[in-house]
Each structure stands twice: as structure tokens, then as C-alpha cells.
């Protein structure tokens, strides 16, 4: 009975709380209705404005890296239990707006951007007071900012007042669901924690309609709140009494249920005891089974390991076995051509055997085994024995091949017969041992050094002998007359250079020497690089040799050794170390052969120094064709030849310059100097010899020749100042006349042609001025004095100066122009007397007359300006007089 009384008291308190809450909600609805103007005159709500209060809840849910926020609407059911009504996602909240038609500011609207897709959406909500509204809106805005990272648009709310309110009030946050009315609990998801904020006093328009319907069932108005509360109390008491009566009636049934539960508990305890016994027995059985399985697994693993060990040992024994035929071949076999296949197979086996005992091919655990170390030492001994035997054989073999060829004179040029070196048979025999050399390199790289030196030493003797015999016979068989080396000396005859003999056979002989030996040396370099296993690019470009000739036999181009790479992983890239070693070896191979080329160049220079031009062009063509890195010595040889040719030609140019300079030591000279026309002949011959890229060499010679010629001409002219201008203008005119055709096609000569033209004009001007002043010195000296005074005084003051009066002017004009025709005739005779080149007289006389008229015209203008009243012969009279002479 005590327990029943306590339950009754608790039930009574809950009912009173529910009645009080309902009363508060009704009063709040009345206030809202009055504020909206929907409260009738009779003190009742109009139709459609009675609603039940609802609850808003804000929650968040964590889903991995994202967090979702929701606005939940809860409503009271007919039994007074809260149940979910609607759900809004705050990520779609785009606008919060306070209604302007509510003076209290408690009504607001929540705008969602996805409301069109929902059937019913409450347009607005009304809170009990402004604090409740601020609390809810502040919570929503904080969640939007912190969780969603954005804020909705806020309309009709003072943000400053909201911030001040937030400092004074703290929002209510509950991490677990609250107990709601009538002891019901709001359901929440079990898998996550949810943060909920509940506002009870929010009344929407739909809830007002529900409240109106509720009051309508009792035929009451909003103003009859007291009567409505009393009626609810009576009904609640009736319900409590019915509940108590039902509890008392169900007491026997409860006793039966308790007895059944007690018997079921006993059965469960018995069953738990039996299950414990069975679990113990099963645990012991499981341990026995695991022990048996472990022993079986160990036995199976031991069997597999033993089988694998036997297989590995058999493979290792197979690696360690040395076939008897290979051992015999490596230690004492012959290196004859017929036995080379067996030697190659033995080398391949030995190489693979050594690699198979190295760590990459062999497991590290086997590498330190005694048997493996002993077998590796045995293989190393075999390798050293074989490499030593093969190296000794190849050194002797190379020497015997070359000795055989040197002893046979048919391999070399003889008297009356030029013999092209033919190394096809030599290379064929060497190719037999090409793969052997590759295997020797893979076995021991250090053994190739002595072999390369032996090959270079032997073949160098053969190449030098071939070059010496060929060069000697080439010079002996070439017939050419010797041309003079003195071209520009004034003591020799004037026609010496004109009748020079044809020496083209000299250039042809030099070209033949290069055509035969340069491709041969390139091929030998290429063959040597491949044969001796240097890792360098191909030497001879496809499509021809360096000079572009297609007439060379195929044997000279064939440097293919007919061998394949032993190791497919060998890199084809050029290695600097190999390239340096190759160039050193090529120097040993070809050193000394350049002396025979030098002998041909010196021989050609003695016959005709100008042939250095054509030989220079031929050498340049070969140099431009040498692109391969391994033909480095051939390029050095060609560069040395080019330098030798340039040195010899420079020697010729220097001697010719000395011949020119010797002219200034002679006695007084008049007329055109001898080296001027001879230089034109020399330049014409030099242009005929130009080939390829020898233009620069010739242009440098032109520059040196002409510079020395002009300097010497100036020195000779300065020795006799009286006739200096005459000598200069005659020689510069002769230079231009003799080089006119060449200057049109040779830019270097054109430059000096223009320089001579300028010097000629300057000499003409000085010479003509001298002749004019000699005949009319007083006249033009008077004019010069007037011009000098015009810089310091006015023109009106000049006639009053001493020696410049009108009387002085009349005296000067009378003395100078009284016999002007005779003076002009004397001027012509003086010009004719001093010139040695008659062809220059007409042009110089025309220049003289023009210069005289210009000077007289200037004099007449001065007289008209300073002495306007004085009369002198007119310029037109002077022009007519000069034209009549």
C-alpha cells in the first residue's frame, strides 16, 4: 500500500504539471492571436486559429569527415506523447527573416532552398518572447558557421543587438535526449552521439489550427481557460482512478508471470552449468587437435625443405662441374682457324660459369661456401691461363701477318706503278679472332692494352711503308715545270708571270694522295675501334666517305666485323674513358705517316707556291667530312696538313711582300710601279686556284699584299714631295684599272678598290690645286685674304683694309687675267709634262678646268659682295674660254 500511495502521488504531480503546461500554452496562444488581430469580439479565436504547441529540436550527426545538422519538428500526439513531425536539413537553410507584421518580434520565417520538393513547409514560427527567439536563432547560426562553414541571409534582425544578447546569455546544449512530458523519451539514433537543443514554447500557424480544433471539441473558447482546466482535472482524476482499478485487477496475473520467470531462471542456471562443462571438454580437445596439426605441419615443411635442398644442391653441383672438353680447350687447345669455334664455346662457358658464381646470379648464402670458393679459384686459374695463351698467340699472329705483307713487294707502289693499299685480306684474317677478343675483354679487360699496342706497332710499320712508297712514286710520276717564286720584284721582267706553266698536276697529285690514304686511315681507325672492342659510335657515316666520293672500292668501306654483342645488356653509349684510350691507340697506329704527306706538300710548294691555295681547299673539304669521334687522329692529321699548307703559303706571301718593300730602296721612280700590274696578274692566278673553303686564305693574302703595296707607295711618294701626287694618282689609277674585273666579284679586292679610288681623288685634288695656284696665285690669294677677314669684320669694312682696296683689286685682276688664255694654256702644258700616263690626261684636264671655274666663281661672288661697283670678267666668259681650248 505504501508503494501504491507513492505511485499515486507521482502520477498526481505529473498530471498537475501537464495541466499547468497546457494552461500556459493556451494563454500564449491567446497573446499571439491578439497580436495578429485574430482574437474575436466575443473573446474567442476565429475558426482555423487554434493549434497545439510544438517543439523544435536542433541536432548534429558526424559522418566521417563531414558533419550534418538537422532541424526537427516534434508534436504532441492525442496521448500527450512527443513524436517526430518534420525534418529539415540546415545545409539548405538560406534565409532567416523576422516577420514585419508582428510588433513583438517573436515571429520569424526560416527559408530553405529545397522547400519546393516537400509537401508541407511551415512558413513561419512564433516564440514566447524575444529571448527565446534569440536563443533559437543564435544556436542555428552558430551551427551553420561552425559545422557547415557558411551563414544564411539574415533579414529584419539587428546583428549588433544579437551579439550583445549572446554575451549575456548562454545557449542550452544537451548531449543526450531529454525526458519529455508524461515520461516519454525522444528517440535518437544509437550509432552516433547527437547534440539537441529543444525549444518548447514555439507555436506555428498549423499548431494554432490544431489548438483551435481541440478547444472546439469541448465547445469552449480561448477565454474559458479556467473552466477548461477544471474539466481537464476532472478527466485526469477519472483516468487515474481507472488506472488504479486496472492495476488492482491485474495483480494475480502479475504473480503468475513472476512464478514463470523464476522457474525459467532456474532452467537457465542449470543450462549454464552444463554449457560450462561442455566448453571445458571442447577446449581440451581443441588443444590436442592444434598440437597434432603443428607436428604434421613441421613434418610436411621438413619434407618440402629436404626436397628443395636436394634440388638446389644438384643445381649447385651442376654449376661447379667443369666439362672435360672445355677444360682441355682452355688449358692447351690450339688457336688455329679450324679450332676457333671450340675456343669460342669454351670462352662462353667460362664467362657464364664465372658469372653464375657471382652474387647477383648466386644466392649470398652460397657465395661463402668452401666448395664454391674453391671452384671459383679454379675457374680464375683457368681464365688467367687461357687469357695468357690467347694474348701471346694474337701478338705473334699480328706481327707475322704484317711481316708477311712487308716482305712482299707486290703490296707496295713500284717504279712506274702506283699501288692502292689493299688491306682486305688482312682484315679478313683478323675478323677470325674478333669474337675471341670480345671474350677476352669480358674475361680480363687489362689484357687488351698490350694486344692493342702490339697491333698498332705492327700495322704502323705497314702503313708508313705504304705511304712512303706511294708518295715517292707519286712525286716521281708527276711531270710539272717549276713556276717562279718571285712575282712582285721590280728587277725581273714584266712578262715573267704571264707565261707561267700549268701546274695543275701538282694539285691533282696531292688530291690523289688524300683520296687514297684518308679513307684508308679512317677505315683502319674504324676497324681498329671495333676489332679491339672500344665502346664508341660508328666511324664511317653511311652513304660514302669523308670526301663524298663514290669511286672507292667497297673493301675500303667494309669495317663490319661480322660479330654480335655477347652481352645484350652492353650499353651503346660513348664512354669518355674508352674514347681517350682509343685516341691514344690511334696515335700509336698512325703516328709517323704525316711525314710523307708533309713531303708531298713541300714538293708541291717548290714547284708552284700558288698551288697551296688549291691544296688548302682540298684539305678543307676532307676536314669538313670527318665527323666521327674515333677518327680523331685523321682529323689531327688533316689539321696539321692545313697548317703546313697555310705556313708554306704564308711564307710565299711574306717573300712577295719583301719584294714589294724592296722597291722603296731604288732610285727616284716615276710612273706606274712594276708591282701594281703584276699584283693584278698574281690575283687572277690565285682566283683560278681557289677551291672549296680556301677563300679566307686568299683574302688574307690579298689584305697583306695590298696593305704593303699602299704603304710602300706612300713611302716612295714621300721621298720626292714635288712629284708625290703625280706618282700616287698614276699608281692608284693603274691599280683600279688592272683590278676592275676582279673587284666586281671579290669583296676583299672591292674594298681595296674603293680605298684606291678615294686616294686617287685626293691626289688629283692636291695636284690640280697646285697647278692652278701656280698660274693664278695672286688672284686666289687675294680671295683667301678676303674670306679670312669676313670672320672678324663686316664686308663694308674690307675695302678699307691695307692691300684690299679697290685699287689693289684692279691691280690683281689686271696682272692675273690680262693674258688668261696664255695662263690656261701654260696650265695644260704643265699638266701634260708631269704625267707619264697619257690616258689620264683628258680626265685630269677636265677636273682641272672644273676646279678652276669653281674657284673663279667663288672669287666673282666675293667681288660682287665686297666691291659691288667693280667689274671683272664674267664666269660665263671664262667657261667659254676654257671650252674653246
Image (tube, rainbow, N blue to C red):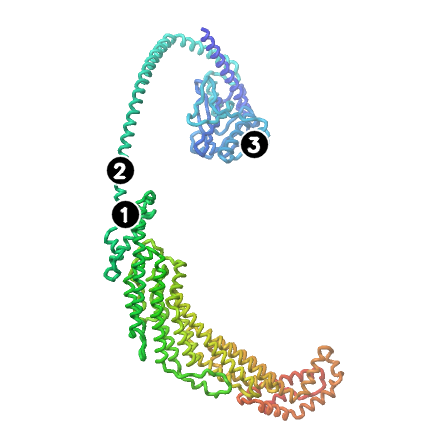
Q: Position of residue 183 (x, y in %)?
A: 46, 17
Q: Which residue is mark 1?
A: 320
Tell me the distance, in whole angstroms, between the alpha carbons under discs 2 and 1. Answer: 21 Å
> In the depicted view, which residue is nearer to us: 500 or 148?
500
- Residue at the image point whose x is 46% and y is 77% from the top: 745
Disc 3 target residue? 157
Camera-side residue of 452 and 265: 452
Identify the secondary structure beneath mark 1. Answer: helix
The residue located at (72%, 84%) in the rendering is: 867
Label 3: which secondary element? loop
Disc 3: CA contacts within 10 A as few (<14), some (14-19) or many (>=20): some
Q: Is residue 414 visible?
A: yes
In this rendering, the answer to whether 50 lies above or below 483 is above
Does label 2 or label 3 sit earlier along the sequence?
Answer: 3
- The residue lying toward the viewer, choosing from 643 and 361, is 361
Q: How many other residues sit within 10 Å of disc 1, few (<14), some (14-19) or many (≥20)?
A: many
Expressed as whole percent of the image width and height from the top left, the position of residue 787 reads 69, 80
The C terminus lies in which quarter of the figure?
bottom right
Amino acid at each position: 500500500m505504501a508503494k501504491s500511495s507513492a505511485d499515486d502521488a507521482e502520477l498526481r504531480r505529473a498530471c498537475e504539471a501537464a495541466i499547468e503546461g497546457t494552461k500556459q500554452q493556451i494563454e500564449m496562444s491567446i497573446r499571439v492571436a491578439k497580436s495578429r488581430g485574430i482574437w474575436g469580439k466575443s473573446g474567442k479565436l476565429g475558426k482555423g486559429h487554434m493549434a497545439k504547441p510544438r517543439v523544435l529540436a536542433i541536432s548534429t550527426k558526424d559522418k566521417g569527415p563531414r558533419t550534418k545538422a538537422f532541424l526537427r519538428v516534434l508534436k504532441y500526439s492525442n496521448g500527450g506523447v512527443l513524436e517526430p513531425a518534420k525534418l529539415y536539413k540546415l545545409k539548405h537553410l538560406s534565409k532567416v527573416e523576422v516577420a514585419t507584421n508582428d510588433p513583438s518580434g517573436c515571429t520569424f520565417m526560416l527559408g530553405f532552398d529545397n522547400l519546393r520538393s516537400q509537401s508541407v513547409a511551415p512558413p513561419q514560427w512564433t516564440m514566447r518572447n524575444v529571448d527565446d527567439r534569440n536563443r533559437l536563432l543564435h544556436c542555428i547560426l552558430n551551427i551553420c558557421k561552425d559545422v557547415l562553414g557558411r551563414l544564411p541571409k539574415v533579414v529584419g534582425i539587428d546583428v549588433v543587438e544579437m551579439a550583445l544578447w549572446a554575451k549575456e546569455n548562454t545557449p542550452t546544449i544537451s548531449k543526450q535526449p531529454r525526458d519529455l512530458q508524461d515520461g516519454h523519451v525522444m528517440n535518437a539514433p544509437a550509432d552516433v552521439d547527437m547534440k539537441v537543443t529543444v525549444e518548447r514554447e514555439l507555436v506555428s500557424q498549423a499548431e494554432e489550427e490544431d489548438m483551435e480544433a481541440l478547444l472546439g471539441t469541448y465547445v469552449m473558447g480561448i477565454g474559458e481557460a479556467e473552466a477548461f482546466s477544471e474539466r481537464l482535472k476532472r478527466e485526469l482524476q477519472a483516468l487515474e482512478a481507472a488506472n488504479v482499478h486496472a492495476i488492482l485487477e491485474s495483480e494475480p496475473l502479475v504473480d503468475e508471470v513472476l512464478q514463470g520467470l523464476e522457474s525459467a531462471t532456474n532452467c537457465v542456471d542449470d543450462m549454464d552449468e552444463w554449457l560450462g562443462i561442455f566448453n571445458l571438454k571442447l577446449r581440451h580437445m581443441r588443444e590436442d587437435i592444434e598440437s597434432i596439426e603443428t607436428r604434421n605441419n613441421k613434418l610436411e615443411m621438413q619434407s618440402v625443405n629436404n626436397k628443395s635442398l636436394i634440388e638446389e644442391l644438384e643445381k649447385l653441383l651442376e654449376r661447379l662441374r667443369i666439362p672435360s672438353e672445355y677444360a682441355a680447350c682452355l688449358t692447351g687447345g690450339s688457336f688455329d682457324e679450324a679450332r676457333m669455334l671450340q675456343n669460342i664455346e669454351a670462352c662462353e662457358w667460362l664467362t657464364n660459369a664465372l658469372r653464375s658464381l657471382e652474387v647477383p646470379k648466386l644466392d649470398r648464402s652460397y657465395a661463402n661456401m668452401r666448395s664454391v670458393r674453391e671452384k671459383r679459384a679454379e675457374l680464375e686459374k683457368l681464365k688467367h691461363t687461357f687469357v695468357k695463351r690467347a694474348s701471346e698467340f694474337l701478338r705473334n699472329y699480328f706481327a707475322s701477318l704484317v711481316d708477311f705483307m712487308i716482305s712482299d713487294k707486290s703490296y707496295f707502289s713500284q717504279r712506274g706503278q702506283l699501288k692502292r693499299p689493299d688491306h682486305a685480306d688482312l682484315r679478313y684474317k683478323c675478323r677470325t679472332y674478333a669474337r675471341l677478343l670480345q671474350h677476352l675483354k669480358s674475361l680480363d679487360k687489362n689484357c687488351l692494352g698490350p694486344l692493342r699496342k702490339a697491333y698498332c706497332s705492327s700495322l704502323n710499320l705497314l702503313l708508313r711503308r705504304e705511304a712512303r712508297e706511294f708518295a715517292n712514286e707519286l712525286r716521281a710520276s708527276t711531270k710539272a715545270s717549276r713556276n717562279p717564286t718571285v712575282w712582285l720584284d721590280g728587277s725581273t721582267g714584266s712578262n715573267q708571270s704571264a707565261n707561267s706553266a700549268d701546274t695543275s698536276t701538282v694539285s691533282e697529285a696531292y688530291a690523289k694522295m688524300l683520296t687514297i690514304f684518308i679513307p684508308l686511315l679512317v677505315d683502319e681507325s674504324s676497324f681498329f675501334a671495333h676489332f679491339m672492342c672500344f665502346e664508341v659510335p660508328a666511324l664511317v657515316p653511311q652513304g660514302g666517305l669523308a670526301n663524298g666520293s663514290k669511286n672507292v672500292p667497297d673493301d675500303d668501306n667494309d669495317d663490319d666485323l661480322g660479330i654480335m654483342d655477347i652481352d645484350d645488356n652492353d650499353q651503346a653509349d660513348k664512354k669518355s674513358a674508352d674514347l681517350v684510350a682509343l685516341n691514344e691507340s690511334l696515335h700509336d697506329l698512325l703516328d709517323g705517316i704525316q711525314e710523307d704527306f708533309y713531303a708531298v706538300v713541300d714538293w708541291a710548294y717548290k714547284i708552284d707556291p700558288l698551288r697551296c691555295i688549291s691544296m688548302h681547299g682540298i684539305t678543307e673539304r676532307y676536314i669538313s667530312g670527318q665527323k666521327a669521334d674515333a677518327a680523331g687522329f685523321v682529323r689531327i692529321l688533316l689539321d696539321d696538313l692545313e697548317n703546313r699548307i697555310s705556313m708554306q703559303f704564308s711564307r710565299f706571301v711574306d717573300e712577295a711582300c719583301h719584294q714589294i718593300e724592296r722597291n722603296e730602296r731604288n732610285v727616284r721612280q716615276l710612273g706606274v710601279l712594276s708591282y701594281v700590274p703584276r699584283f693584278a696578274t698574281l690575283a687572277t692566278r690565285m682566283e683560278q686556284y681557289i677551291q672549296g673553303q680556301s677563300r679566307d686564305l686568299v683574302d688574307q693574302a690579298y689584305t697583306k699584299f695590298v696593305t704593303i703595296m699602299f704603304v710602300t707607295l706612300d713611302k716612295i711618294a714621300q721621298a720626292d714631295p714635288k712629284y708625290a701626287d703625280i706618282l700616287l694618282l698614276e699608281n692608284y689609277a693603274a691599280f683600279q684599272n688592272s683590278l676592275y674585273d676582279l673587284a666586281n666579284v671579290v669583296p676583299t679586292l672591292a674594298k681595296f678598290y674603293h680605298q684606291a679610288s678615294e686616294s686617287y681623288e685626293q691626289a688629283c685634288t692636291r695636284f690640280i690645286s697646285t697647278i692652278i695656284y701656280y698660274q693664278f696665285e695672286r688672284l686666289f690669294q687675294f680671295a683667301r685674304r678676303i674670306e679670312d677677314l669676313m670672320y672678324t669684320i663686316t664686308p663694308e669694312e674690307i675695302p678699307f683694309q691695307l692691300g684690299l682696296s679697290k685699287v689693289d683689286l684692279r691691280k690683281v685682276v689686271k696682272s692675273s687675267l690680262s693674258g688668261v688664255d696664255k695662263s690656261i694654256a701654260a696650265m695644260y702644258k704643265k699638266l701634260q709634262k708631269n704625267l707619264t700616263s697619257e690616258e689620264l690626261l683628258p680626265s685630269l684636264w677636265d677636273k682641272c678646268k672644273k676646279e678652276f671655274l669653281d674657284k673663279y666663281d667663288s672669287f666673282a661672288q666675293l667681288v660682287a659682295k665686297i666691291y659691288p661697283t667693280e667689274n671683272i670678267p664674267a664666269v660665263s666668259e671664262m667657261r667659254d674660254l676654257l671650252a674653246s681650248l
